[in-house]
């Protein structure tokens, strides 16, 4: 085929209305097929990207859950350790009994035992009102005693070095009288930590 024949055939296609209609229909179907394929391809690609994103999110959640599961043994161990520490603290360092009234009796017994061990003669002992702060209950005790200064010193050291959390809030040591130089009057307010 020569170029002149090709041009002649193309001219015939566009000048004949039936042939022109066929060419336009083929071009319209071709364009529609191209648009349909383009739409299908972009939809497929977008769906694939959405699936990839979902897969990444699920993988991230899975890794987080794996870390939580792996850390649950550590969490249980730490919880048990903290509970053990709380039990030891309650048992060894707090003045704690089944109720606040029994805790007050326990404090009185501890102070009474420390005073008799160190030669301090307790004349009176009186519980003061309890105070509470942040779940911690402070038991307060007022004592009036009589003893030699060395016995008072030993008593103070015994209370301060006791494993229980007992502290002196106030204290007053006075000579009983001008003629009495051996014994002293000792008044003190003590506080002990307990929990509810």
Image: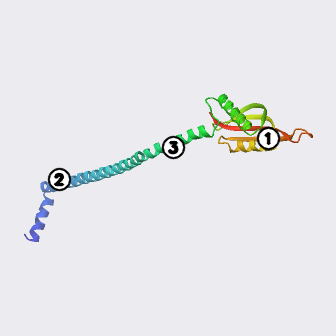
Mark-to-mark CA distance, 2 and 1: 112 Å
Q: Is residue 125 visible?
A: yes
Q: Residue furthest left?
A: 1
Comparing marks 2 and 1, which lies closer to the viewer? 1
Q: What residue sits 72% from the left and 34% below the top?
A: 112
Place of residue 126 in the rendered image (x, y in percent of width and height, measured from the top left): 76, 30
Q: Could you tell me residue 103's position as x and y percent?
A: 66, 31
Q: Gap between marks 1 and 3, in whole Å?
A: 39 Å
In which image quadrant can residue 2 be found?
bottom left
Residue 136 visible in this rendered orientation of the protein: no
Please indicate whether residue 14 sits to the left or right of residue 167 in the image: left
The earlier-in-sequence mark between 2 and 1 is 2
Residue labelled with disc 1: 171
Residue occupying the far right of the picture: 178
Residue carrying label 2: 25
Secondary structure of residue under mark 2: helix
Viewer-closest of 140 and 65: 140
Q: Residue at x 68, y 30 (%)?
A: 105
Q: Secondary structure at mark 1?
A: strand
Check disc 3 and report the residue beneath it: 81
């Amino acid at each position: 085929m020569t170029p002149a024949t090709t041009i002649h055939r193309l001219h015939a296609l566009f000048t004949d209305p039936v042939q022109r209609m066929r060419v336009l229909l083929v071009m319209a179907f071709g364009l529609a097929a191209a648009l349909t394929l383009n739409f299908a391809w972009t939809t497929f690609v977008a769906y694939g990207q959405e699936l990839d994103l979902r897969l990444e999110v699920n993988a991230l959640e899975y890794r987080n859950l794996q870390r939580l599961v792996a850390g649950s043994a550590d969490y249980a161990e730490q919880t048990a350790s903290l509970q053990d520490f709380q039990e030891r603290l309650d048992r060894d360092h707090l003045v704690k009994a089944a109720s606040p009234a029994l805790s007050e009796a326990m404090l009185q017994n501890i102070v009474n035992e420390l005073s008799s061990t160190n030669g301090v003669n307790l004349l009176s002992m009186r519980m003061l009102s309890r105070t509470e702060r942040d779940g911690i209950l402070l038991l307060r005790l007022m004592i009036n005693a009589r003893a030699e200064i060395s016995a008072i010193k030993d008593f103070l050291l015994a209370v301060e070095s006791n494993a229980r959390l007992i502290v002196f809030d106030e204290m007053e040591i006075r000579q009983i009288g001008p003629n009495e130089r051996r014994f002293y009057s000792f008044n003190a307010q003590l506080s002990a930590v307990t929990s509810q």
